[in-house]
Every structure is written in C-alpha cells, then in structure tokens.
Amino acid sequence: MTALAPPPVRNRRPETSADSLEELATLRATTSPTVRRRRERGEPSAWTVWALRLGVVVLGLGLWEAGVRAGFVDPFFWSQPSRIWDTATIAFANGDILSNARFTFTSTVLGFVIGVVGGVTVGLSFWWSRRYALTAEPLFIAFEAMPKLALAPIVVLVLGLGMGSKVAMATALVIVIQVLNTFSAVKAVDKDLTTLMYSLGASRWQVFTKVVVPSTLPWIASSLRVAIGLALTGAIVGEYIGSTAGLGRMIQYAGSTYDIALIWVGVFTLAILSMLLYVVVSWFERRLLKGITHQA
Amino acid sequence: MVTTPPRPGASGLAERSSAQLTIDGVHRTFPSPDGGTVQALVDANLSVRPGEFIALIGPSGCGKSTLFNLIAGLDTPTSGRIRIDGVDRSGQQGLVGYMLQKDLLLPWRTILENVVLGLEISGVRKRAAHAIARPLLTTYGLGGFENRYPHQLSGGMRQRAALLRTILFNRDIILLDEPFGALDAQTREQMQEWLLDLWDDFQKTVLFVTHDIDEAIYLSDRVFVMSARPGRIVAEFEVGLDRPRKPSVVTSPEFVRLKAEARELLNGAHASAAPLAEVA
C-alpha cells in the first residue's frame, strides 16, 4: 500500500486479492489527469470561408491560363479559360446551352420523379405480403448489381434518340435503389407499433397508412439526394449513347470535333445544373423531414 | 376464490360495465428453432369480475406477455378458450385496451392526436374524438401538452398519454404490461396514484403485469403468481386492504404480511420451475 490512499483494512477481504488491490493503488498513484486543450478561436466567419473558396478557384483558373500562355500546357488538349469563356458567351447567346440544359434537366427530373414514385410504391408494397417480398427482393438486388449504364445502348435502340430513352435510363438508375431503400425502411418499422395498432382493432390498411407509411417517410426523404444524382447520371449517359439534344450530347459532339472549349462549357453547365438540383432536393428533404418528425 | 366482496366504492357504474373475462384452460405452444416445441403457457385459468383490479407477477419468461397477447386477440391459444362477457373471443382483436411496456406514441402525431388513435381507428370523426379527449387531457394532468410531440415530454408524461390512449379506446377491460417499469421510483409512485384515480373514475377491469411485489399489492384486488418454463399460474391471493388506499398503506402490518406471502409464493414458483426447465 502506498502512502497516498491507505484503504481501511477489513477482515472480509480474501487474502488472494491483496496483490491486485496493491497493484491498483500503485497505478492510481502514478496516473496523472489528462487535460484537453480547448479551442480558443470559434468558428471562422462565413465571409472568410467564401473568400478563401473563391480564391482557390481564381488561383486554379489563373494558373491554367498562365500555363497555356507560357507554353507549359497544350491548349489543343486542355483548352484555356479565356477561350472557354468566349465559347460560353457564344453558346449562351445563340441559345445552344439553354435548350440543351433544358432537355437534360427535363429528362433528369422526369426520371427522378418516376423512379422515386415507382420505387417507393414497389418498396411499400412489400409490406403486404411476405411471400411476394421474399420472391421479389433478390431479383431487385440482382438488378441493382447489374451495371445499368451498360444497358444504355439497348435502351436507346428500343426507345429512340428522343427524350424517352433518357428518362428511362434515369428511372432505371433511381428506381432500384428506391425499392431496396424503401423495403429496408419497411422492415425497420417498429413491430410493437403495428402490434399496438392491431390491438386497437385496426385493419391492415389502417396500419399501413397510419404507421407504415409515416415510419418510412424519413428514410425516403433522405434517399432523395442520392436519387437526383443518379437520375442526372442516367440522363447524361443516355445522351452520350445517342441523342438529338442535351448537354451530354453537346459534350459528346464537341469531343468528336476536337472542340475542347465547348466540352468544358458543357461540363461546367452540367456542374451548375447538378448543384442546382442538389440544393432544391436538399431543401425539399429538410422540409419533408421537419414535417414528419417535428424535430429541428 | 369467489369470496371477495365487490370493490368498496364500486357504484352502479361498475355493475353497468358488466365485462367479465374468463380464461379457460388456455395452452399456448410455439415451435422452437430446434424443431421441438416451447410451452409458453400451460393450462391457464382465471376469471375476472367486472371492475376488478388484477395483478400478475412472475419472473421473466413466465408467459405474461403471451397471456396478454392471447387476451388481446393478437395470438390464438393452442387449446382452451378466452371468453369476454361469456362469448368465446379467442383470436379477436379490438375488444380490450392493451398498453405495452413502451409508450409507443407515434412520433409524428401530437399528444392529442395520439390519445385519440383508438377512437379514430374505430371510426370516430377526428373532430368528435378531439372534443372527447381534450377535457380528459386537462383532467388527467396533460393539460397544455395537447399540441406537443411525444419527444418533447418526459417519460412519465408519455406514459400518461399512452394510458389515456388505452382508456380512450373505450373498452371495459384494459391490459397493462409493466406500464411503469421504465420509470424512476418517484414518478412511478405518482403514476400508481394516478392510475388508481383513473380506475376509480372509469370503472375499468384492469389486468396489470409487474415485477414489483409492492406495486402488485398496492394496486390490486387479487394477485396471480406465475412461474416460468413453462409459464403457468401457480398461485393467487386476495388483497383485502381497504380502498381508497394511501401510499402509507405499504407500512401497515397487513401489507407487510401480504408481501411476505407473495415473496414466498414467488420463490416457490422459481423452485418449481427449475426441474421443469430440464424437461423442456
């Protein structure tokens, strides 16, 4: 026993544990308290962060432009910011960008909506029959494992060069993930809640509408952001394979004519479109979640 | 044991709610994963008079929940009958109020919307159901919480809401499966008082499952002792304490005597369970 904490000796203590007790006392005497250093400065201000972000972008573009002018970067392969800007102004002025963006936007949104509604409907339908669910689930998992983008040539051949094939591609990518996600949500519904409902004499339809659907809504809401990204990918790939319009087709066309600047214009437009969709869907998701869970 | 006089204070109201529950030789066997069978409940017999407060005590796995699921009609007995008002109601749901251990309030509904769930399911219009529930929420300690969501309430308050939902389901018999099991000692005591008030006001027939001998004796008219593996009712005794009971009754000699008796019966239930477990 060290001098630090001599415990009162009691007779009941078995002899065998004496060594352990001594060991513990020694350990206690030799441990020092840890100190966690707190951060002195708070969060950096929003303005600083935005300024820094903008700075990084400007620096990147500046280096690119300078690299081309100094001859380090080959503009044939990489183009250059100034030329991209010129191409963009022209493409905007003649309406090319806007009409192509509208095509891509429309097929993405249609594919997203059809995929989500269809996927959620199928996923929820699994709640009704165990046999049906057990039969269908592995088939959906198999479909999910299949690289659906590889099906694009068939889809375009069957549905043609118009918007239909793009919507179909977007839908195909979204729907499977929605089915599986919704089914996970259905499986996670609290069994005690359904028991309670049945004990109150509820019909299956009442259990479905009053418990199953509201329970799964948060899952569905949080899958929307992934779904919109998938829808856009599907639509673009459809356009790459063969299309009459769209940003994907514009990029593909520019690539085949070595118009590197136009490729970049297409890519940046796509990026903006993608961010826009993401922001809108995130906002919708937050609204939906707040409406269901009533938590901030 | 038919000698118990009707509950003191039981007025004409109690006679009117003539619900009577009879469990008649009920067995429930489940298939076990190894291909055999598990006897969850063996030869359960009990008969409950209208307005009576019954407590069931027993170790885990004594088939209390199985029994409640059978009474609530969520499960059907392997053999035997469950009669309500003399009619065989085995496997029929919606005839008794059933409160599970968890409060099971729907998180997306306000307290008011939660307590009217039973009425809503039985087809009462929302406005009418709300009109019935609002004054009751105020009377029974949930005034001002009507439009709150469950996550904004304390455990005790949520349990109150869950119990009011069970009461508002408007059935003569209510089953309470360890409703206060998760509450701290002080809240639990308040809730017991509150439950006795409710029982007095609504004249319900109550079946109450608990692990707590004190709680069982304090609340009930009769206590059934169950044993585990296989689950069976092994003993019953009457609680002759006068009503209304004050919390101080727990120190009275009669209470202490009943408690000792209950403990002995429970220990007996444990002992008798041991050899049976080897057979099963």
Image (cartoon, coloured by chain):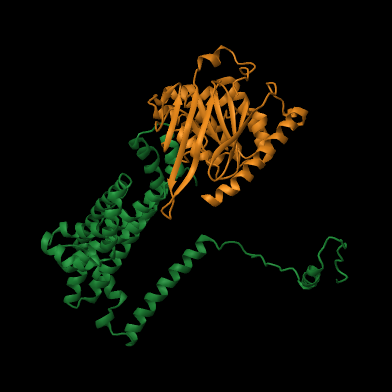
Chain colours: A green, B orange
Where on the picture, by quarter, is residue A63? bottom left
Please report the residue visible at 23 percent of the width from the left and 72 percent of the height from the top. Answer: A262
Which residue is at a point 45% across and 35% down the rendered structure image? B70
Total numbered badges shown on the rendered structure: 0
Splitting the image into 4 quarters, where does residue A111 fall? bottom left
User: In this image, B138 relative to A170: left or right?
Assistant: right
> Which residue is found at the position 28% from the left and 47% from the top?
A121
Tell me where residue A163 appears, x and y as whole percent: 16, 57
Q: Position of residue B154 (x, y in %)?
A: 60, 39
Horizontal side of residue A175 vs B196, given as left or right: left
Q: Nearer the viewer, residue A191 or A5?
A: A191
In the depicted view, which residue is nearer to us: A272 or A165? A165
The answer to whether residue B101 is seen in the rendering is no
Q: Residue at x 49, y 43 (%)?
A: B40
In the foreground, A286 or A221: A221
Quadrant, the N terminus of chain A: bottom right
Residue B226 at x, y = what percent? 58, 38
Q: Does residue B87 show up? A: yes
Residue A221 at what x, y percent from top left?
Answer: 38, 50
